[in-house]
Image: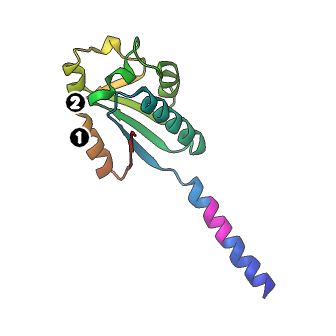
Amino acid sequence: MKTFLNLILSCFMALAVYAQEKPVKIVFDVTSSDNAVHKSTIRHVKAMSNAYPDSKFEVVMYSGAMEMVLKDKSVVAEDLAMLAKKDNIDFVICEGTMKRHKTDASQLIEGVRSVPDGILEIVNKQKEGWGYIKEGK
């Protein structure tokens, strides 16, 4: 009986380990102008990418989050640029937001790319099976 219980326990442990190592795909939604939200977003993406190195992450910024991706205004510029160099992390800004803020691509932190519509980017990721996290307070 003890051997049987050990076998069952071993199977559950193996499944738990496998479940934690299975790659995930997560899209982060950032609309806040709050620097604390920008910092926590970077902290979350950094932690998740370290915990799940085979997973994919995309941070979609629009509306009030414009300053998060500006070279001369972002409080997370250094960390964002470093994370953007990773193959499994993507940072995107909404082109509509860029137009409203009269911003062009030369003002963006290196590694940030633009998409026509931030909300549509998130919807399309969700259609593809990506998980969703809304960053904010």
Determine which residue is flagged by label 1. Answer: 120
Labels 2 and 1 touching (C-beta < 8 A): yes
For the residue labelled by badge 1, is the local secondary structure a helix, a strand or a loop? helix
Residue 70 x/y as whole percent? 37, 17
Q: CA distance from mark 2 to mark 1?
A: 8 Å
Residue at the extreme bottom:
1
Q: Is residue 126 above or below residue 46?
A: below
Looking at the rendered image, the quarter that the N terminus falls into is bottom right
- 120 relative position to 54: left or right: left
Number of other residues with Cα within 10 Å of mark 1, as a class: few under 14, some 14 to 19, many 20 or more = few
- The disc at residue 116 is 2
Residue type, numbered disc 1? Leu
> In this picture, which residue range is highlighted in magenta?
12-17
Residue 65 x/y as whole percent? 33, 28
Asked where in the image residue 111 lies, by quadrant, the reply is top left
Looking at the rendered image, the quarter that the C terminus falls into is top left
Q: Residue at x 30, y 26 (%)?
A: 114
Q: Residue at x 53, y 34 (%)?
A: 43
For the residue labelled by badge 2, is the local secondary structure a helix, a strand or a loop? loop
Residue 136 in magenta stretch: no
| Colour scheme shown | rainbow
The chief SS type of the magenta part is: helix
Residue type, numbered disc 2? Pro
Residue 94 x/y as whole percent? 26, 29
Residue at the extreme right:
2
- The disc at residue 23 is none
Q: Is residue 71 above or below residue 119?
A: above
Q: Residue at x 22, y 14 (%)?
A: 102
Q: Is residue 71 above or below residue 87?
A: above
Number of other residues with Cα within 10 Å of mark 2, as a class: few under 14, some 14 to 19, many 20 or more = some
Q: Residue at x 50, y 45 (%)?
A: 55
